[in-house]
Image (cartoon, rainbow, N blue to C red):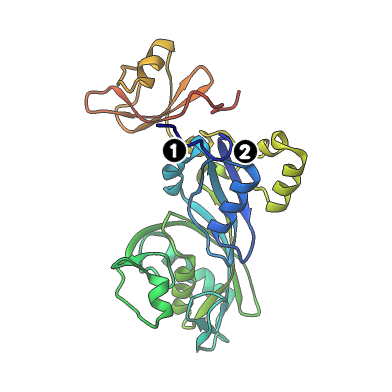
C-alpha cells in the first residue's frame, strides 16, 4: 500500500504575525501556510477579526509546542468608548444601551483600576467562541439566545491608563490566558456608572515573545517574491516560545535513549515539571520529570529539521 505524499514542504519554525484588521485568525493562518508552502501549520490563541496584533503561527514541528503557547500570558492595548454599549461588546454590534459618562474623570478611572487587578472571576461574553451543548456561544447569540455561562478564573497583573479623551479610554493590559478584554471594558465602565464598547484592540505580546518583532502579511509577501530562503528568515526557532521551562543538556548516549522514548537519569534535573531538552545546540523537545525523578519524553522534535539557533 503506497503512502500519500505530504503536500507542501517540511518547514518548521514560529512566525509572529501582526494580524491585520477585519481578518479572522484562521484566514491569516491559511495565507501564511500558503506563502510558506508549509505542509503543516496552526495558530495559538485566536484574535477576533476586529482585533489586530501578535498571532503566533507554528509551522511544521513547531505545532508540537503550540499547546504550551496557548497557556502564555498576553499584553493588550485597548480603546473603549464610554456612554454606549453594543450587543457584541465591540464596534461590530448594534448599540443596545446608552448612558451618560459626563461625570467620569481620569482620576476616577485610575481609582477603579485596582478593583480589576489580581485574581478575578470573569463571566465570558455571549459573543465568544466557547461552546454550550456543542454550539458556539456567538452562534446562539446571533439567534437571540442567551445561556448561563460559568465564571472563569483569570489574573490581571497590570492595567495602565494611557489616555482619556472625548469619552475614549485607552489602556495597556497584562493578563492571563482566557481573559476577555471586551468584558473587562464593560465591567470597568459599570464601575464608573456608565457603559462602553471596545473600539480598538491590539495584542502587543504573547508569553516570552515580547523581545521579538512582528511581521506583517505585506512583508511576508515581499519576502516570498525573493524566494524561500528570505521567507524562512522570518521564522523563529521552535524553542523560543517555551524559554520559561528549565533547560537540560543531554549527552549523546542520553539523547539516543530519549529519542527511543525511554526515560533517562539526568544530573541536576529539577524535581518535577516540564523541561527543555538539548543535545549540544540542538533542541530535542520537551521532557517531563516522572514520579521516580527520571526525565521522560513529552514532545520530541523530528531529527530532520533545524530546531534551535546555531
Q: Which mark is residue 64?
A: 1
What residue is drawn where x is 46% and y is 45%? 69
Say which quarter of the image contains residue 133.
bottom left
Asked whether, in this view, residue 253 is left or right of residue 49, the answer is left
x, y percent for residue 201: 58, 65
Q: Nearer the viewer, residue 239 or 267?
A: 239
Say which quarter of the image contains residue 141.
bottom left
Residue furthest top as drawn = 253
Q: Residues within 10 Å of mark 2 (few under 14, many from 20)?
A: some
* 232 over 280 or under it: above or below: below
* Secondary element at tag 1: helix
Say which quarter of the image contains residue 191.
bottom left
Residue furthest left as drawn = 292
Where's the C terminus, which quadrant? Answer: top right
Where's the N terminus, which quadrant? Answer: top left
x, y percent for residue 67: 41, 44
Q: Is residue 214 among what the camera can see?
A: yes
| Circles 1 and 2 in contact, beta carbons < 8 Å | no
* 260 over 227 or under it: above or below: above
Q: Separation of disc 1 and disc 2 at Cα? A: 16 Å
Q: Residues within 10 Å of mark 1 (few under 14, many from 20)?
A: some
* Secondary element at tag 2: loop
* Mark 1 / mark 2, whichever is N-terminal: 1
Q: According to the image, label 2 marks what residue?
A: 235
Instruction: Tally the numbered discs.
Output: 2
x, y percent for residue 101: 55, 85
What residue is drawn where x is 46% and y is 83%? 193
* 55 over 265 or under it: above or below: below
Q: Is residue 126 among what the camera can see?
A: no
Q: Which mark is residue 200?
A: none
Amino acid at each position: 500500500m503506497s503512502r500519500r505524499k505530504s503536500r507542501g514542504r517540511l518547514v518548521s519554525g514560529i512566525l509572529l504575525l501582526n494580524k491585520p484588521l477585519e481578518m479572522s485568525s484562521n484566514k491569516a493562518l491559511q495565507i501564511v501556510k500558503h506563502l510558506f508552502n508549509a505542509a503543516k501549520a496552526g495558530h495559538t490563541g485566536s484574535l477576533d477579526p476586529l482585533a489586530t496584533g501578535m498571532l503566533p503561527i507554528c509551522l511544521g514541528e513547531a505545532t508540537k509546542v503550540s499547546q504550551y503557547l496557548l497557556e502564555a500570558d498576553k499584553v493588550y492595548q485597548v480603546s473603549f468608548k464610554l456612554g454606549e454599549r453594543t450587543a457584541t461588546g465591540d464596534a461590530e454590534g448594534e448599540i443596545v444601551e446608552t448612558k451618560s459618562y459626563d461625570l467620569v474623570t481620569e482620576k476616577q478611572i485610575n481609582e477603579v483600576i485596582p478593583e480589576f487587578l489580581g485574581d478575578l472571576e470573569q463571566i465570558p461574553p455571549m459573543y465568544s467562541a466557547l461552546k454550550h451543548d456543542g454550539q458556539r456561544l456567538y452562534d446562539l447569540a446571533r439567534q437571540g439566545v442567551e445561556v448561563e455561562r460559568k465564571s472563569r478564573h483569570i489574573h490581571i497583573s497590570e492595567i495602565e491608563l494611557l489616555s482619556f479623551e472625548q469619552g475614549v479610554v485607552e489602556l495597556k493590559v497584562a493578563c492571563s490566558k482566557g481573559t476577555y478584554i471586551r468584558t473587562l471594558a464593560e465591567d470597568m465602565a459599570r464601575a464608573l456608572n456608565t457603559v462602553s464598547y471596545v473600539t480598538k484592540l491590539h495584542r502587543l505580546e504573547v508569553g516570552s515573545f515580547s523581545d521579538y518583532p512582528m511581521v506583517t502579511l505585506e512583508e511576508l509577501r515581499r519576502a516570498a517574491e525573493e524566494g524561500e530562503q528570505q521567507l524562512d528568515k522570518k521564522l523563529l526557532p521552535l524553542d523560543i516560545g517555551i524559554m520559561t521551562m528549565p533547560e537540560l543538556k543531554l549527552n549523546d548516549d542520553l539523547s539516543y535513549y530519549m529519542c527511543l522514548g525511554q526515560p533517562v537519569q539526568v544530573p541536576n534535573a529539577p524535581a518535577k515539571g516540564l523541561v527543555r531538552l538539548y543535545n549540544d545546540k540542538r533542541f530535542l523537545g520537551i521532557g517531563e520529570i516522572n514520579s521516580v525523578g527520571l526525565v521522560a519524553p513529552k514532545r520530541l522534535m523530528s531529527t530532520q529539521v533545524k530546531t534551535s539557533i546555531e
